[in-house]
Image: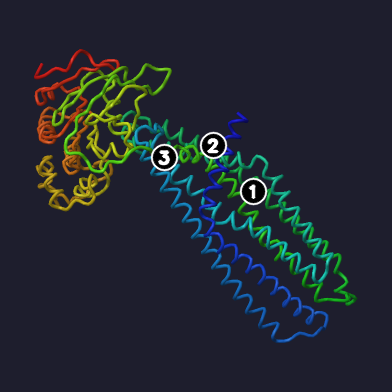
């Protein structure tokens, strides 16, 4: 367990270091503005010290000191606003870059990533959001907390070396206190994020399955389970906050001790016996100035711990190798698909999904893959879509090894229609155009006509511009499936992959969808995984699969 935590910590640190190096240019602005703010605060403290000495001790001061202190206050306000904006810009840039890369990795993995949708959503949203504080506040604060206190202590030492030494010693005690209070804080933060991810993931998944929970009368039981997960999150959050309060208290204790030492050293100013009252007031006024960057460091310290916990979860996904392989110069108009003794296993402890599968589909031919659930039909389609790589054997396209291509290039060759089409909350036209965003309205309409979408779209209030709900809310299963077919028509690829495209449809709707499928497959190489007996009367070639192997030779014609 300890070695696992060590590996996770090393992976998180490596990820943060890479992102920090990429963002280095963005950090110069916040750091320089922070140092300028610290120096302006020192100058203001000196002017205020001169005014206080004149007021309380009777030394000389001028209106220039008063005007200068006011002008510095305005300058400091402007510097603070500019620094905050620069930090926000750096954090937003880091988040945007991370989120784009994580989302791209999740898209590249596709169905191969078995995590629930809620957990994937938490990775892209909550985990990336937790990284903002590291780049926006922690990194600038860490640099400023080293440089600014040294400059401020040096300014104090120019007036009184002992006072400068007191401030320097107090500053050195701050990271010690932070480290002491932060022992175990990173792990507590990691556990808190894990609890948040479980809760958000569970909540999203249950919201998506709300009709099922209601039908099985599980509302009360699921409410109790969600309450238990929320209580776990509350407890872990309070542990993290407890550490934060301890750290804050340690900082205030050190600041109070430094102020007390300086007050004792320069207390004679109140009796009029101090040789240099301006110096006395100046070094005392420097205490809040000295601890200002250290307080920012302490506030960002726990954001850094939270970011390390988030980075530990993101690192395994981002460390996965990029897609490798050849690129297509152009999409060939015709494809011949060959599987030769292909073997594929998802889990060594289970039987292989494919165990020596061999078949061939000629250009322009349609092949039905039939067999019981779990026979390996979907696994064959996944290989052709680039979501799985065979352990052995050869998959060829037009006689060349298909696995030499990048997975994304394999997907360029094919159109896919699964059992249940996922439709987004958008118009019918936008859902169809998802297959080819650059398609014009004429091409979208032609695809809708070919897939028989217009048979029901003409009766809708706004035709293809009618808004539908998330998941196809407002359409029947058959209508949603026709929209998915329209996407395949619009995509217009030489290879068509269909996985139980008529499952869950009534006989009348099934016949309509099969008729559209037959038109889709004309002139294209098509592989259809199906249980439907009705499909056998539409397509002539059939291959029975059992236990990942072809049973006999391909059959032609109807049964």
Quadrant hosting residue 390: top left
Q: Nearer the viewer, residue 268 or 164?
A: 164
Task: Name the element at disc 1.
Answer: helix
93 sits left or right of 111 in the view: right
- Label number found at residue 309: none
Mark 1: give few (<14), some (14-19) or many (20+) Cα within 10 Å.
many
Mark 3: give few (<14), some (14-19) or many (20+) Cα within 10 Å.
few
Quadrant where the N terminus sits is top right
Residue 476 in percent (x, y) is at: 18, 37
41 sits left or right of 56 in the view: left
Question: Label 3: which residue?
Answer: 322
In the displayed structure, would residue 147 be above or below residue 160? Answer: above
Question: Label 1: which residue?
Answer: 244
Question: Label 2: which residue?
Answer: 232
Q: Is residue 204 visible?
A: no
In the displayed structure, would residue 74 be above or below residue 261? Answer: below
Cα–Cα gap, marks 2 and 1? 19 Å
Task: Name the element at disc 3.
Answer: loop
């Amino acid at each position: 367990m300890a070695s696992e935590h060590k590996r996770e910590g090393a992976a998180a640190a490596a990820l943060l270091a890479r992102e920090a190096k990429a963002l280095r240019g963005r950090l110069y602005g916040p750091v320089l503005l922070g140092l300028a703010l610290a120096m302006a605060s020192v100058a203001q403290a000196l002017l205020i010290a001169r005014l206080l000495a004149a007021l309380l001790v009777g030394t000389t001061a001028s209106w220039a000191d008063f005007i200068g202190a006011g002008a510095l206050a305005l300058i400091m306000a402007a510097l603070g606003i500019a620094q905050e904006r620069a930090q926000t810009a750096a954090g937003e840039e880091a988040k945007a870059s991370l989120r784009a890369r994580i989302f791209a990795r999740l898209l590249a993995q596709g169905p191969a990533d078995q995590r629930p949708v809620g957990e994937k959503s938490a990775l892209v949203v909550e985990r990336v959001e937790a990284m903002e504080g590291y780049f926006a506040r922690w990194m600038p604060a860490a640099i400023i907390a080293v440089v600014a206190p040294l400059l401020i202590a040096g300014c104090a030492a120019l007036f009184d070396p002992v006072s400068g030494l007191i401030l320097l010693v107090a500053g050195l005690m701050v990271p010690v206190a932070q480290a002491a209070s932060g022992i175990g804080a990173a792990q507590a933060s990691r556990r808190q994020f894990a609890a948040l991810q479980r809760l958000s993931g569970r909540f999203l998944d249950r919201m998506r399955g709300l009709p099922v929970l209601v039908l099985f009368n599980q509302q009360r039981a699921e409410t109790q389970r969600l309450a238990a997960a929320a209580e776990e999150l509350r407890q872990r959050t309070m542990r993290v906050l407890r550490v934060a309060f301890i750290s804050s208290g340690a900082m205030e204790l050190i600041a109070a001790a430094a102020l007390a030492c300086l007050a004792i050293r320069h207390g004679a100013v109140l009796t009029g016996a101090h040789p240099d009252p301006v110096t006395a007031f100046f070094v005392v006024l420097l205490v809040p100035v000295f601890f200002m960057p250290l307080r920012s460091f302490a506030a960002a310290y726990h954001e850094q711990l939270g970011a390390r916990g988030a980075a530990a979860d993101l690192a395994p996904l981002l460390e996965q190798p990029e897609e490798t392989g050849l690129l297509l110069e152009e999409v060939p108009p015709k494809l011949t698909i060959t599987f030769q003794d292909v073997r594929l296993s998802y889990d060594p402890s289970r039987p292989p999904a494919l165990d020596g599968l061999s078949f061939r589909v000629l250009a322009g031919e349609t092949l039905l893959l039939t067999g019981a659930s779990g026979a390996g039909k979907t696994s064959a389609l996944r290989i052709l879509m680039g979501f799985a790589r065979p352990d052995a054997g050869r998959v060829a396209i037009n006689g060349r090894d298909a696995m030499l291509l990048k997975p994304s290039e394999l997907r360029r060759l094919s159109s896919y229609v699964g059992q249940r089409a996922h439709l987004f909350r958008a118009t019918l036209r936008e859902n169809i155009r998802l297959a080819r965003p650059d398609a014009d309205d004429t091409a979208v309409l032609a695809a809708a006509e070919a897939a028989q979408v217009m048979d029901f779209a003409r009766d809708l209030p706004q035709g293809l511009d009618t808004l539908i709900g998330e998941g196809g809310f407002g359409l029947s299963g058959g209508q949603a499936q026709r929209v998915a077919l329209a996407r395949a028509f619009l995509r217009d690829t030489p290879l068509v992959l269909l996985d139980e495209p008529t499952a869950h449809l009534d006989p009348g709707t099934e016949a309509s969808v099969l008729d559209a499928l037959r038109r889709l497959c004309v002139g294209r190489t098509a592989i259809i995984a199906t249980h439907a007996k009705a499909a056998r009367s539409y397509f002539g070639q059939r291959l029975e699969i059992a236990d990942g192997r072809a049973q006999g030779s391909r059959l032609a014609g109807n049964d």
